[in-house]
Amino acid sequence: MAAGFKTVEPLEYYRRFLKENCRPDGRELGEFRTTTVNIGSISTADGSALVKLGNTTVISPPTDAPDKGYVVTNVDLPPQCSWRFRSGPPGEEALVASQFIADVIENSQIIQKEDLCISPGKLAWVLYCDLICLDYDGNILDACTFALLAALKNVQLPEVTINEETALAEGNLKKKSYLNIRTHPVATSFAVFDDTLLIVDPTGEEEHLATGTLTIVMDEDGKLGCLHKPGGSGLTGAKLQDCMSRAVTRHKEVKKLMDEVIKSMKPK
């Protein structure tokens, strides 16, 4: 009976739960889904991470190539991760997500271009960060930001020198160093229901029924790195401040989880 009502009147179905300050999956309005991260999950990449946010799963294997010293990002939403995506050129949601991640990297200064320089005017690293969604169930921006950060923390680049006699680059795969990660941006997403009610970490179904969404990126110092509000319902100053406060708390939770995973990977 409940399944049939949900199919016919999905919004009204959600409203009945929201009036009781809970959601159909049993979570409170301000409760995140279980979040996990597996760092270094792809052995053939210089750095990688797999992040699960409930059922939403994103994997990030950055690769490298010599050029001007910058970071190239791409979010891939293949048809295998959800029925809503089709094969072919990237759709609007994938393009928006890719630009969002690029903005996060630029605004937060997670990596500075100078740190990627091997030899001034001659050689520098380019990091290609491909974020591939394996399973889509909403809140793709939070999962992608977390996967990107965790993967970059895992990257080890080989030592490269330029041979003075041949003027060619020579790499030492036995001597690698980690990237200099200067900040740790974490994204926190919200959905707005009926123009007034806010919930965190929306599922795909909740995003579809919501009247608006909001994503806030904070660093460890509580500095705002990015605010993504693609139209929809407006928010009062008080509600926006509440979202920012919740984003600061979420940053601590995610940073703690990532630090624990990285610590567990170190040889004892």
Image (cartoon, rainbow, N blue to C red):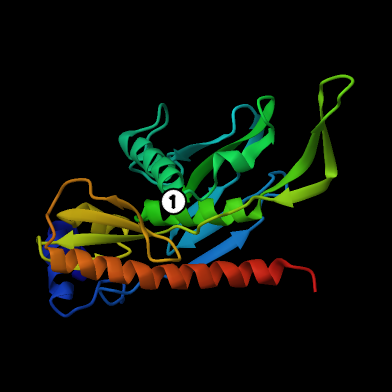
Residue 197 visible here: no
The quarter of the rendered structure image containing the C terminus is: bottom right
Q: Nearer the viewer, residue 233 or 41?
A: 233
- The image position of residue 155, as x and y in percent, is 66, 49
In this picture, is 218 found above or below 76? below
In the displayed structure, 87 sits above or below 222; it is above
Is residue 208 found left or right of 147 in the rendered image? left
Q: How many marks?
A: 1
Q: Which residue is mark 1?
A: 108
Q: Residue furthest top?
A: 166
| Looking at the image, residue 123 lies above or below residue 3 | above
Residue 105 visible to the viewer: yes
Front residue of 243/144: it is 243
* Residue depicted at 27% across the width and 61% down the height: 190
| Front residue (pair 72, 134) | 72
Q: How many other residues sit within 10 Å of disc 1, few (<14), some (14-19) or many (≥20)?
A: many
In this picture, residue 4 sits left or right of residue 218 = left
The answer to which quarter of the image holds residue 5 is bottom left
SS of the residue under disc 1: helix
Is residue 37 placed above or below 162 in the rendered structure?
A: below
Report whether 43 appears left or right of 20: right
Residue at the far bottom: name it. 20
**Quadrant for the N terminus in the image:** bottom left
Q: Amino acid at mark 1?
A: Ser
